[in-house]
Amino acid sequence: MKQEWKEIELGNKMFFEIIGSGINRFEDSKEYLSTECIKETEIKKTEGEITFNERPSRANMQPKLNSVWFAKMQNTLKVYSFNKNNSFLIDKYILSTGFAGIKVLENIDEDYIRIFFLSPIFNKIKDSNCSGATQKSINNNAISKIKIPLPFSNGKPDLQKQKQIVAILENLERLKEKRKRAILLLDKYLKSVFNEMFFEKGFKEKLLDEVSEIIMGQSPSGSSYNQNGNGIPFFQGKAEFGERFPTVKNWTTEPSKIAESNSVLISVRAPVGSVNVCNIKCCIGRGLASIKPNKETNLEYLYSTLKILENKISEMGTGSTFKAITSKQLRNFKIPLPPIELQEEFASIVENVEKLKEKQKQSLEKIEELFNSSLSKAFVGELI
């Protein structure tokens, strides 16, 4: 059996059919399937139904099976594969503009194409072909010229080898999702423990101003900013927040407002309410405030409380251009305050859960490295 690899253009009608997406919205009351209806690679709901004859003039009704879609925009790569495994059964659908669809024909596995669209090879090709002044995107003509590496046997695409490659990569994808789900479940566990220990227990509520020292941020002179490590770390807003701790990107030699280590940083301007733990002494800009707990308040308890109440804090934001909360609003915000011993018990639980999360994260990083390495090998014939 003679085997070889060939690069086939997506515009080759022997193997692929390029499908255009629909339009941004319907002019009448009809709704359609938008990208918000799609969870991961599955259709979870439809916003409405429409027949082929009722469709807007520029909207194609797309067949559900054996097609792969990806976002045309340079910075929003998302890939969806609609095939027989989808639990939501509809015969045809319309997607909003900004998407391109590839219907696969004989001897081509749609999941092989989906995974190719996730590969560094495709990302590089896509980015190099994007154009546009305001928002860069790739057009259908450029899409048709994209070449996909395919394994061939006896002059035809080798469907079995494609499926073997997909099986290896999808197994790694499943492992990644398991680790992500484990981390999510640990977060949910902490929230449930917190609710069980503290909420609706009748603990006296106190103002944030009574249980902590609050410092509203103020941006230093722009000329003092640097990325060379000169001066003190400077955080401007939520953009520098991580999952738990902020990431230092800038420093300032002229600090104005200082946040101490072992305090909570909270975003007070667009968006409002997001929190991180401040683990270093730093300068904070106008988009942030620091909340340093006093002796009757445990840091982990304070952080968890504010994190759980983030939506409530966000709803306090006002402003026509962008939402913000004032110093007075923040100082007068109330939280339940249980005895310090109970707060410390919760802090101990948090510490143990964080250790478990860290192990899951390290495992996830290793799996992602293996997945990315395998992805790079898969389309040059080095994986199997």
Image: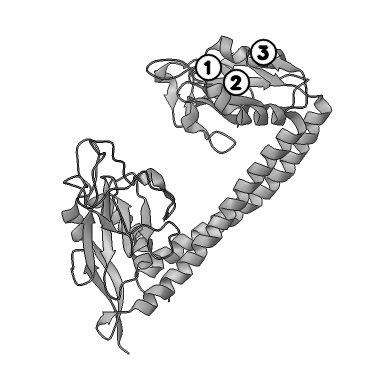
- Quote the CA–CA distance across marks 2 and 1: 8 Å
Chain-order first, disc 2 or disc 1: 1
Is residue 119 among the parts visible in the rendering?
no
In the picture of the structure, the residue carrying the numbered disc 1 is 217
Could you tell me residue 181's position as x and y percent? 58, 52
Asked where in the image residue 114 lies, by quadrant, the reply is bottom left
Pick the quarter of the image with the N terminus: bottom left
- Camera-nearest label, 1 or 3: 3
Residue 145 as seen in the image, left or right of residue 169: left
Query: What's the amino acid at mark 1?
Result: Gly
Residue sitting at 69 percent across and 49 percent down? 356
Residue sitting at 27 percent across and 86 percent down? 154
Q: Quick one: label 1, few (<14), some, or many (20+) residues within 10 Å? A: many
Q: Quick one: label 3, few (<14), some, or many (20+) residues within 10 Å? A: some
Is residue 157 among the parts visible in the rendering?
yes
Q: Which mark is residue 135?
A: none
Which element type, helix, strand or loop, lies under badge 2?
Answer: strand
- Quote the CA–CA distance across marks 3 and 2: 12 Å
Name the residue nearer the viewer: 245 or 65.
65
In the picture of the structure, the residue carrying the numbered disc 3 is 209
Q: Quick one: label 2, few (<14), some, or many (20+) residues within 10 Å? A: many
Is the residue under label 3 in contact with that under label 1 (CB below 8 Å)? no
Which element type, helix, strand or loop, lies under badge 3?
Answer: helix
Query: What's the amino acid at mark 2?
Result: Ser
In the picture of the structure, the residue carrying the numbered disc 2 is 290
Name the residue nearer the viewer: 26 or 289.
26
Asked where in the image residue 306 lies, by quadrant, the reply is top right
